[in-house]
Image (cartoon, rainbow, N blue to C red):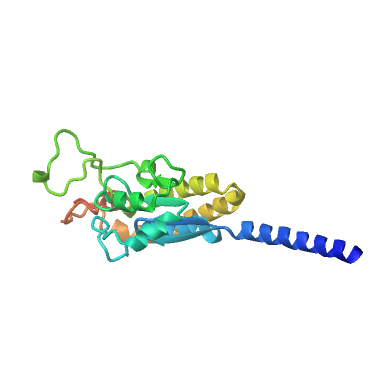
Amino acid sequence: MKKSFASAWWLLAASLALADTTAAQKKLKVVTSTTDLHDIAHQVGGNRITAKAISAGYQDPHFVEAKPSFVLQLRDADVFAFVGLDLEIGWMSILIDGARNVRIKPGGSGHLDVSKAIPVLDQATGRVDRSQGDVHPLGNPHYWLDPENGKRIARLYKETFTRLDPAGAGEYARNLEAFEKRLDAARARWAPLLAQIRGKPVVAWHTSWRYFANYTGMNI
């Protein structure tokens, strides 16, 4: 009887330990629309998240093929972070609808429009149509090319991850602080080089470099 009682307690303790381990190992599943958002998510999330990017670095994120594999990624996602401002308008809704994941649908806990954290440039006023070329009526979506916006993106991730995973609040805060310090150090290294091009006229195709030009002082 004593042996059976001891065995029962051992099994109970083992089950509880396994449950605690499983809970501790559960990571937030993050999917991003671009590699830029993917990298910053990793910087902030660290070991408490897994992250995948839908578009590759060599691809134009305006034009992504809505593959079934992307639907599967989004089906299990806790967070879907996207650039917004209609950058992904050609494919994002197809993937979200196909995933049938309430967490990442508009209004869901993991539907993360990163542009909401950004002071957006080039917001259209008045009538806009295709005769004006490739225009983003909601504003210029290429905001990650300004390092200060990199900080804004990281802070948004920190807030989002903390809300969904309160136990990781301390780690997310430390990771954010470390990321900002690395970025500040990089900006200090870049400053002498960028001073050489400040005020220089630049010809650019599309409006992709507007945020970078604002940061560097180049004149597009």
Q: Is residue 78 visible?
A: yes
Query: x, y percentage for residue 60?
Result: 25, 60
Count of marks placed on residues: 0
Q: Does residue 78 sit above or below 68 in this rendering?
A: above
Residue at the location (35% across, 56% down)?
33
Q: Which residue occupies the foreground of this view, 76 or 7?
A: 7
Question: Which residue is outermost to the right?
Answer: 2
Residue furthest toward the top? 126
Q: Nearer the viewer, residue 124 or 146?
A: 124
At x 17%, y 46%, the residue is 135
Q: Residue at x 54, y 57 (%)?
A: 27
As drawn, the residue found furthest toward the left would be 131
Q: Is residue 201 left or right of residue 104?
A: left
Considering every residue shown, the one lying at the far front of the view is: 1
Horizontal side, residue 168 vs residue 84: left or right:
right
- Drawn side of residue 31 relative to residue 90, left or right: right
